[in-house]
Amino acid sequence: MDQPSIAARKSLKRKLEHDSLEGRDDRKFRAAEAEAEPDTTGQDLALEIQAHVDILNSTFSSLEADRAAAKRASHFLSQLAKNEEIVNLIVDCGAVPALVMHLMAPPPLRGESTPKQYEHEVEKESAFALGLIAVKPEHQQLIVDAGALSHLVDLLRRHKSSSNSRAINGVIRRAADAITNLAHENNVIKTCVRIEGGIPPLVELLEFVDVKVQRAAAGALRTLAFKNDENKNQIVQCNALPTLILMLQSEDPTVHCEAVGVIGNLVHSSPNIKKEVLLAGALQPVIGLLSCSESQREAALLLGQFAAADSDCKVHIVQRGAVRPLIDMLESPDAQIKEMSAFALGRLAQEMHNQAGIAHSGGIVPLLKLLESKNGSLQHNAAFALYGLADNEDNVAELVKVGGFQKLQDGEFIVQATKDCVDKTLKRLEEKVHGQQVLNHLLYLMRVAEKSVQGQIALALAHLCAPDDRKAIFLDNNGLELLLGLLESGNQMQQHAGAAALYKLAAKTTSVSLLDAAPLSPTPQVYLGEQFVNNPTLSDVTFLVEGKRFYAHRICLLASSDAFRAMFDGGYRERDAKDVEIPNIRWDVFELMMRFIYTGSVDVDIEVAQDLLRAADQYLLEGLKLLCEYTIAQDISVENVSLMYELSEGFNARSLMEACILFIFEQFDKLSSKPWCSHLIQHILPEVRDYFTKALTKPIQANLKQV
C-alpha cells in the first residue's frame, strides 16, 4: 500500500496549516499572523530569523517574560516555516536545536506552585515548527540528531499528568504530527521512534477524547507501520486493532480515513497480521467505507489485500455487498479510486462464482472502458480483472457482445505486463469459444440479438473460432454476411474491423502455398528438356515470332495444353502448316513460354510477368499462369492493387484475385484513405462472397498471404 496522501509533503503541509486555523476566528488569527511575519526579504529576513532564534536560546526558563518571549519566537518561526522556500534559511540560522530545547518544559522556579505560564504553548509551537521543517526530507535526521524524538514522545504522554484542556490537546497533536513528518519515507527514523518508546503512547491516544488527537495519532501510526515489520508487530501487540476497527465506523471521515490507512499498512505484505485484522472484525466496516469518498480508495485497496488471503475471504467480501460499490467506483473521476477498485475486483475475480457475480452486476463495460486510460497502472488493473472474468464461460458471451474482444485486440497498452495479460485473456476467450456451450450461446445471439451485437459476435468468432466450426458460423448462421455487411457500412471503424476479421478468416481457411497447390494437368506432361528449346533437331513445326523462326516439336506441344491440342488436332489451319505465325507475343515472352513447356519450370521476372500471364492464359498453360500470378502478387501495393485486381479479372487469374482480396483486407487501414477504395470494395464483394463460400464449404488449398 502506498503512503497515505496526507503523509505526502505538500499534503502534510496543507494539513498542518489547516489545523493551525481550526477553532479560531479567521480574520483575527490572520491579523495576528501578519503582525508576527515581518515584511522583510533576503538578508533582512535572515537577521530577523536569527533574532528570534537568539530569543529561544536565551529564554529557556519559567519566568513569565521568558515564556512569553519564547512563545512569540516559536510562533514566528512556525508561521514562517509554512513557506518551504524559507525553511532552509530557518535551519541555517540554527533554529532546530533551539526549537528542540523548547520541546521540554523549563525547570520550575523555586517555590513555584501555581501553573506555569503558557504551559504547553511554547512546546506546541516548537513541535509545530519542527514538523513543518521535517516536511523537507533533508532536515529529518538533523532534527532527530538534535534529540527531538525523546522529547516528542514525552509530549505524547502529557495527557497522563494533566487534565484535558485545549492546550494539552494541541501539544499532543503537534507532537504526533511532527513524528509523522520526521518518519515519512525514512525507515531509520521509524525504527528510532519505536526504540524511543513512541508506539505505545500513540496507540493509547487512539482512544483519546479529542478527535483531532485521535486522527494525529493514527496518522503517525500509519507512517510508522509502512514497510517496517517490527513497527507493525508492536502496534498489533499494543492491541491497536480493536480501536482502529471501531474508528473505521466513526462518523468523522477524517478519522476513519486515517484508521483504514493504518490497517492497510499493517496488513501490507504481512499475512499473519492480515488474518488477525480479519479475525478482529474489520471486513464489514471496511466494506462500509466504499461509500465514503474520503476513504473508498484505501478501503478498496484493503479489500484487494484481504481477497488475496484465501478463497473463503473472496467469497465473503462479495457476500457482504462489496461488488456493487466497487463497480460504481470504476466510473469515479479520481484515477486512484478507479485503480484501487479495479485492483480489488481483479483479486475477487479469481474465484469462479465471483466472476459471474461481477459480470452480472455490470462490471464488464466499465472495466473495458478503463483499457482506454493513459494511466498504465489503472489500465493494467482493469486488464487483470478482465482476465479473471474471462475464465468463466458464463461471461464470454457478455464480453463479446459488448465489444470486449475488439477492445482487447485493438487497445493500445502502455506496459508490457498489460500486453501479456491481454494476450492471455484473448487466448482464454479462444479456448472458451472452442467449447460447444459457449459457441452455441454465441450462435443463438448471432441469430436473435440486435444487428450491432450480431456484428460484434461475428467479428470475434472470425478470430477465435476453431477450424471445424467455420462453416456452421459463417455459412449456416449467416456470419459471412454479417462481416460483409460491416465492410459495406459507411462507418470506417466497422469497415476496418470487418476487413481484419475477413483477413483472419481467410488466413485460417487456407493452409499451403500457391505453388504447392498448382492444379495438375489433365494429361501427363512430356518434357523434352532444356536442350530441345528452339532446336531444329527433329523439329516438325516452326513459329514465326517478330519475324524470327522458333523451332518446336508437336509431341511436346500436344501434351502441354488443350490450346495446342486444338491447334494441331482440330480443324484449324495451323494443323498442317509448317510455319505458324504468332502475331501478338514478343519474342522474349514466347521463348519463356516455350521453355516452360519443354522443362516444366521457368524463372518469371516481374518485368515480363504480365505479358507472360497473358500468353499463358491464351494457350491455357495453367502451371505457367500460376507462376506468373505468384510473381505478380509479390508486386501488389496500396497504389496498384486496384489495377492488379482488374488484371486478375481480365485473365481469370483466380489466385492473383484472391491475393488482391487478402491484400485489401490486410492493408485496409492504408487503403481506406484512398478515394477509390469504397468503389473497389463494392466491386470485389461478389468475388469475396464466392471465395469464402467455396473455401468454407471445402477449404481451398492456396494460402493467399503467401501469394
Image (spheres, rainbow, N blue to C red):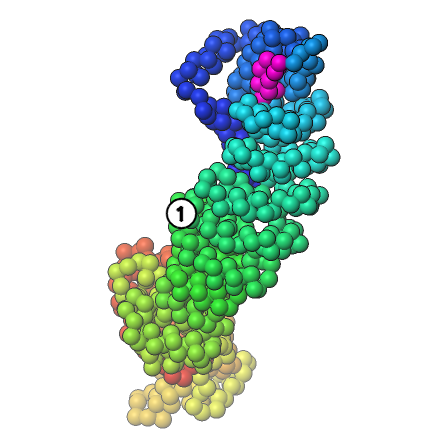
Above or below residue 558? Residue 648 is: above
Tell me: residue 321, above or below residue 528: above
Which region shows up in magenta?
Answer: 114-124
The 10 Å Cα crowd at callout 1, few under 14, some 14 to 19, many 20 or more, is some
Amino acid under label 1?
Ser
Q: Nearer the viewer, residue 47 or 562?
A: 47
Q: Say left or right for 423 vs 276.
A: left
Question: Residue 694: x, y in percent?
Answer: 36, 81
User: Is residue 116 found inside the magenta-colored segment of the image?
Assistant: yes
Q: Quadrant of the C terminus?
A: bottom left
Task: Name the residue rendered at 57%, 18% in the picture.
Answer: 121
Residue at the image point whose x is 31% and y is 58% from the top: 492
Q: Quadrant of residue 629?
A: bottom left
Residue occupying the point 70% across, 27% down: 150
The relative height of residue 673 versus residue 645 in the rendered view (above or below) is above
Residue 210 appears in view: yes
The residue wearing badge 1 is 332
Q: Position of residue 630 (x, y in %)?
A: 45, 71
Magenta span dominant secondary structure: loop
- In this picture, residue 403 sits left or right of residue 603: left
Tell me the SS state at disc 1: loop
